Image (cartoon, rainbow, N blue to C red):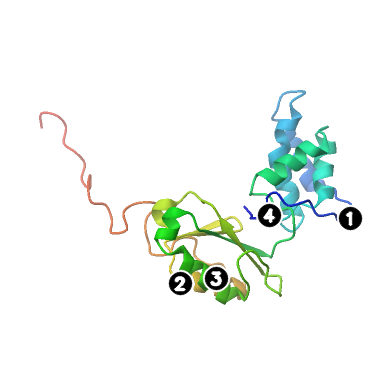
Amino acid sequence: MSTTAGSAPVETGPFAFTADNMRLAQAIIAKYPSGRQASAVMPLLDLAQRQHANWLPRAAMDYVAELLDMPAIRVYEVATFYTMYNTKPVGRHHVQICTNLPCWLRGSEQIVSACEKATGTVLGETSKDGMFTLSHAECLGACVNAPMMQINDDYYEDLDETSAASIVSELKLGHTPKTGSQIGRKTCEPAGGLTSLTEPTKGRGA
């Protein structure tokens, strides 16, 4: 996701899928009935974005439009509506911090501050070294484990200022930070562990 949704597509040089990605694209298109190939637009845009340093130039959108025999404007509409697509360059690590109500109540403002300090940039901008882009996310769908953030494809949950800064530091060093809950929570169970139904119930009449 990205806060760049709705911005004008950036123009670059020509774009074409690599041979491997073209095979993937053809396999995706083949999943849809004849004449309905436009249904593949979202996965193909994702494929193009992953090939092009995690963002979509206009040339990539035009290429997908031609491949699917769609008007280019329809592809632009999809790419600028869904926040999973980036229509301008982002850093190597796209840090998207949820600031919606559940995360805000649990301290997302402190997470934003910690990430700004750790990356040397501010929300909505990219660090000078090109490593980090900080973005606001409206909701990332893990409210029980708030506050949280998404970095590229990974979720980091149950954050505080220390763990958020540590994750950024690990990425700076080229390491792979622990994903998921940062406090050892199992999926979305209560933070203190299960409090009910901890033992199998007995059958009726037992």
Residue at x 72%, y 47% (from the top left corner) = 47
Q: Amino acid at mark 1?
A: Gly
- Image marks 1 and 4: residues in contact by CB distance under 8 Å: no
Callout 4 secondary element: loop
Q: Separation of disc 1 and disc 4 at Cα?
A: 20 Å
Q: Amino acid at mark 2?
A: Glu
Residue 187 appears in the picture as rendered: no
- Observer-nearest residue: 59 or 154? 59
Q: Which residue is mark 2?
A: 161
Residue at x 74%, y 33% (from the top left corner) = 29
Classed neighbour count for the residue bearing mark 4: other residues with Cα under 10 Å, few (<14), some (14–19), many (≥20): many
Q: Amino acid at mark 4?
A: Thr
Within the image, what quadrant is residue 78 found in? Answer: top right
- Image marks 2 and 3: residues in contact by CB distance under 8 Å: no
**N-terminal of the two: label 1 or label 2?**
1
Residue 115's spot in the image, x, y percent? 55, 71
Q: Which residue is mark 4?
A: 4
Q: Which residue is mark 3?
A: 115
- Image marks 3 and 1: residues in contact by CB distance under 8 Å: no
Q: Which residue is mark 1?
A: 13
Q: Separation of disc 4 and disc 2 at Cα?
A: 25 Å
**N-terminal of the two: label 4 or label 2?**
4
